[in-house]
Image (tube, grey):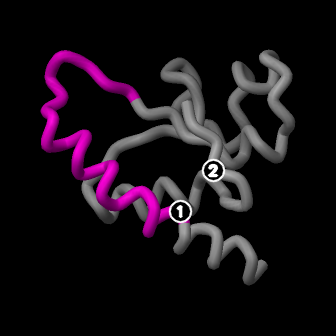
Amino acid sequence: NITFPETESDGLLLLLDAEGIASSTGSACSAGVPRPSHVLLAMGISENDARSSLRFSLGMANTEEEIDHVASVIESVVERARAAHSRK
């Protein structure tokens, strides 16, 4: 789980999806729920930070190329998400 301050996780999800990257705003048991992760809130993370967080899952099937792809686009995705968030 990674927090990207000054963003909204829904915007990040859309931008990452456009890059072919799957992630989630909550735990696997609450995927698709439009509210901050109850797990993060229970851990003491602020609601604002929880709304700016994404979960990335990695497993044996992931390739080094997939991880490199995320690393190569994450900075520009976060910059675009911050720009969109600041216009609100």
Mark 1–mark 2 CB contact (< 8 Å): yes
Range covered by the magenta-colored residues: 57-78
Q: Where does label 2 land, which residue?
A: 4
Q: Where does label 1 land, which residue?
A: 78
In the picture, measured across the screen, residue 63 lies left or right of residue 59, that is left
In the picture, measured across the screen, residue 81 lies left or right of residue 75, that is right
Nearer the observer, 71 or 87 = 71
In the picture, measured across the screen, residue 81 lies left or right of residue 50, that is left
> How crowded is the residue under tag 2: few (<14 C-alpha within 10 Å), some, or many (20+)?
some
Magenta-span inclusion, residue 29: no
On-image quarter of the N terminus? top right
Magenta-span inclusion, residue 77: yes
In x, y percent, where is residue 22? 34, 44
In terms of secondary structure, what is the magenta stretch mainly?
Answer: helix
Looking at the image, residue 88 lies above or below residue 56: below
Which amino acid is tagged 2? Phe
How far apart marks 1 and 2 lie (CA) works out to 7 Å
* SS at badge 2: loop
Pick whichever of labels 1 and 2 is earlier in the sequence. Answer: 2
Determine the residue positioned at 49% across, 38% down.
24
In x, y percent, where is residue 18? 32, 64
Res. 2 mark: none
Determine the residue positioned at 86% across, 36% down.
46
In x, y percent, where is residue 47? 84, 39
Which amino acid is tagged 1? Val
Looking at the image, residue 25 lies above or below residue 8: above
Q: Quadrant of residue 72?
A: bottom left
Determine the residue positioned at 73% across, 38% down.
50
* SS at badge 1: helix
Looking at the image, residue 27 lies above or below residue 71: above
Q: Quadrant of residue 75?
A: bottom left
In the picture, measured across the screen, residue 46 lies left or right of residue 23, that is right
